[in-house]
């Protein structure tokens, strides 16, 4: 079997309604724009697809296909995923590929493999579980009182755990974190995502509050450029750190965080930011060797497959937004997400795809792209 064509299909993605905000200094929810679907065709009629939901992806992907990727991929065996994954890293040396596109070819190849075998991709990756609990991952709200209301709604909807995205003010965020713990009691797992909003002194201040309040993990409080800063944070606070979400280098960079003693809870794994399924699986296995978690970052269908394929992840991340909030499609009243059953990976339903992509659209759940 050989790859015969590689295509980019622009897909219009609506803006989030109602729009939401992140911490101070970050852009909020994306407006309407063009995402991209990569389609890989073969001489045996088997195809694979992968979606980059980020607005503007189609322009970048089209350029990369025309200049670099098409001539690299056409003629190769699509089942040689390992070789092609290494080729993407070689190309990255000169192209500096965006993190969210670095693994797109790999996702499409794993989708193709699943369709060839008539199996869901999570089974092709090995398969560990058939369901996993989802936590409610908040957007940023206006007040402590609103956060507490959102927490009540999340628990009522069946979510067993809650992660905060707050304001990026260490002292205000600390007060919110303590108030939420007091509100929900000691039995509800709570997590905090700093969205890289702090320097080391403020990260330490907030970390002490999270330690005292018994938070399960403290995620990305600082930009992930300095492993040394994270090591100093790990030495200073008791709350476990979840790191290496957006840093470049996939498992290679995650290894540095682990070796330094900075990943005291674990590292992030995701298909979008860790080099597709292949990079995410490397990251998970690396973390497992050190008896650490590899928590899967973000919603989206590929990450549902990843959650079902690795042993050392705890939850599926489900974004809740607006007020009132609603439960993401495909999550049941007990807060469980179930393993996809269709072949390959699937594209999210509910978008206006061209006819060539209709056969790939998910028929089980509706998961609008978030980013």
Image: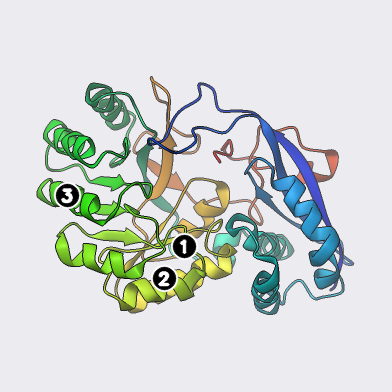
> With 343 as the anchor, is 184 left or right in this view?
left
In the rendered image, residue 258, in percent from the top left (x then y), is placed at 33, 74
Which of the labelled discs sits on residue 130, or is there none?
A: none
Name the quarter where the N terminus is drawn: bottom right
User: Between tags 2 and 1, which lies in front?
Assistant: 1
- Few, some or many C-alpha atoms within 10 Å of disc 3 (few <14, some 14-19, many ≥20)? some
What residue is pinned by disc 2? 254
Query: Taking 281 as reference, is 306 above or below it?
Result: above
Residue drawn at x 75%, y 53% as measured from the top left: 61
Q: Is residue 64 visible?
A: yes
Residue drawn at x 79%, y 65% as measured from the top left: 69
Give the colouring mode of the picture: rainbow
In the rendered image, residue 94, in percent from the top left (x then y), is placed at 69, 71
What residue is pinned by disc 1? 247
Query: Taking 314 as reference, is 357 above or below it?
Result: above
Name the quarter where the C terminus is drawn: top right
User: Between tags 3 and 1, which lies in front?
Assistant: 3
What residue is pinned by disc 3? 205
Which one is nearer the viewer's eye here, 165 or 232?
Answer: 232
Q: Is residue 216 visible?
A: no
| Of callouts 3 and 2, the N-terminal one | 3
In the rendered image, residue 55, in percent from the top left (x then y), is placed at 65, 40
- Few, some or many C-alpha atoms within 10 Å of disc 2 (few <14, some 14-19, many ≥20)? many
| Of callouts 3 and 1, the N-terminal one | 3
> With 18 as the anchor, is 192 left or right in this view?
left
Which one is nearer the viewer's eye here, 209 or 106?
Answer: 209
User: Disc 3 on helix, strand or loop?
Assistant: helix
User: How far, Cα to Cα, is label 2 from label 1?
Assistant: 8 Å
């Amino acid at each position: 079997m050989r790859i015969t064509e590689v295509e980019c299909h622009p897909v219009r993605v609506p803006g989030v309604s109602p729009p939401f905000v992140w911490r101070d200094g970050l852009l909020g929810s994306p407006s309407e724009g063009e995402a991209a679907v990569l389609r890989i065709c073969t001489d045996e009629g088997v195809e694979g697809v992968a979606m980059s939901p980020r607005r503007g992806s189609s322009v970048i992907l089209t350029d990369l296909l025309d200049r670099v990727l098409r001539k690299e991929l056409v003629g190769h065996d699509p089942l040689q995923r390992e070789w092609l994954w290494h080729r993407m890293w070689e190309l990255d040396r000169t192209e500096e590929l965006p993190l969210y596109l670095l693994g797109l070819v790999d996702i499409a190849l794993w989708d193709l493999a699943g369709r060839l075998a008539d199996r869901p991709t999570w089974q092709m990756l090995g398969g560990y579980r058939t369901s996993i609990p989802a936590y409610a991952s908040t957007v940023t709200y206006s007040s402590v009182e609103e956060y507490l209301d959102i927490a009540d709604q999340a628990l009522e909807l069946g979510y067993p755990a809650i992660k905060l995205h707050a304001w990026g003010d260490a002292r205000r965020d600390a007060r919110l974190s303590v108030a939420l713990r007091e509100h929900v009691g000691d039995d509800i797992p709570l997590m905090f995502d700093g969205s890289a909003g702090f320097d080391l002194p403020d990260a330490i201040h907030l970390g002490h509050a999270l330690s005292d309040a018994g938070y399960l993990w403290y995620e990305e409080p600082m930009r992930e450029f300095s492993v040394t800063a994270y090591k100093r944070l790990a030495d200073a606070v008791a709350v476990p750190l979840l790191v290496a979400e957006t840093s470049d280098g996939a498992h290679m960079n995650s290894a540095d965080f682990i070796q330094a003693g900075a990943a005291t809870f674990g590292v992030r794994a995701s298909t979008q930011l860790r080099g597709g399924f292949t990079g995410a699986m490397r990251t998970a296995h690396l973390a497992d060797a050190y008896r650490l978690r590899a928590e899967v970052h973000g919603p989206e269908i590929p990450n549902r497959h990843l959650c079902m394929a690795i042993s050392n992840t705890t939850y599926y991340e489900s974004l809740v937004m607006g007020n009132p909030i609603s439960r993401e499609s495909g999550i049941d009243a007990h807060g469980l997400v179930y393993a996809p059953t269709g072949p390959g990976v699937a594209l999210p339903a509910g978008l206006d795809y061209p006819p060539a992509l209709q056969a790939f659209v998910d028929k089980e759940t509706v998961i609008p792209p978030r980013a």
